[in-house]
Image (cartoon, rainbow, N blue to C red):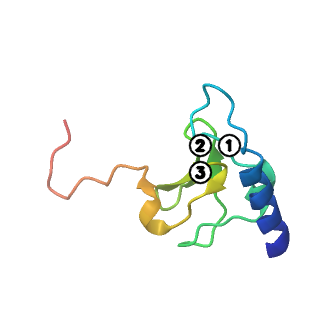
Amino acid sequence: MLRFATAVLRRAASSGQGQEPGKVPGSERLDPSLLRFLVCPLSKRPLRYDEATNELVNEELGIAYPVIDGIPNMIPEAARTTQKKPPAEGSEQP
């Protein structure tokens, strides 16, 4: 299975060789067939693809991994926080 996923990633990366005019570099979308194989490296749980932001989202941890040129960047340090932290005890919310 790992070989198949690697082949799909290579195919997705090589398909963007000839940039279309006006297309923003790094804006290629994730191949949906990869979602069967990809899990969060931290929680080992499946990820949800958010097409609007072009990110793989882990709802449980509240983080999102960017997809660059159709390739997910699943390095934990590259993930951004998607949820607000709960308010500290004793603090008032407006």
- The residue under the point 67% across, 49% down is 70
Label 3 Cα crowd, 10 Å radius (few <14 / some 14-19 / many 20+): many
> For residue 28, which quarter of the picture?
top right
N-terminal label among 1 and 3? 1
Label 2 Cα crowd, 10 Å radius (few <14 / some 14-19 / many 20+): many
Between 60 and 94, the residue placed more toward the observer is: 60
Res. 1 visible in picture: no
- Which residue of the protein is positioned furthest toward the top in this rendering? 22
Q: Is residue 65 above or below residue 19?
A: below
Locate the C terminus and report the quarter of the image it occupies. top left
Asked if marks 1 and 3 touch (Cβ < 8 Å), the reply is yes
**What residue is disc 2 on?**
54
> For residue 53, which quarter of the picture?
top right
Q: CA distance from mark 3 to mark 2?
A: 6 Å
**What residue is disc 3 on?**
67
> For residue 4, which quarter of the picture?
bottom right
In terms of secondary structure, where does tag 1 sit? loop
Asked if marks 2 and 1 touch (Cβ < 8 Å), the reply is yes
In terms of secondary structure, where does tag 2 sit? loop
Locate the N terminus and report the quarter of the image it occupies. bottom right
Between 44 and 17, the residue placed more toward the observer is: 17
Q: Mark 3: which amino acid?
A: Val
**Label for residue 29?**
1
In terms of secondary structure, where does tag 3 sit? strand
N-terminal label among 3 and 2? 2
Q: Mark 1: which amino acid?
A: Arg
Instruction: Give x and y (percent) for residue 79.
Output: 46, 58
Q: CA distance from mark 1 to mark 3?
A: 7 Å
Asked if marks 3 and 2 touch (Cβ < 8 Å), the reply is yes
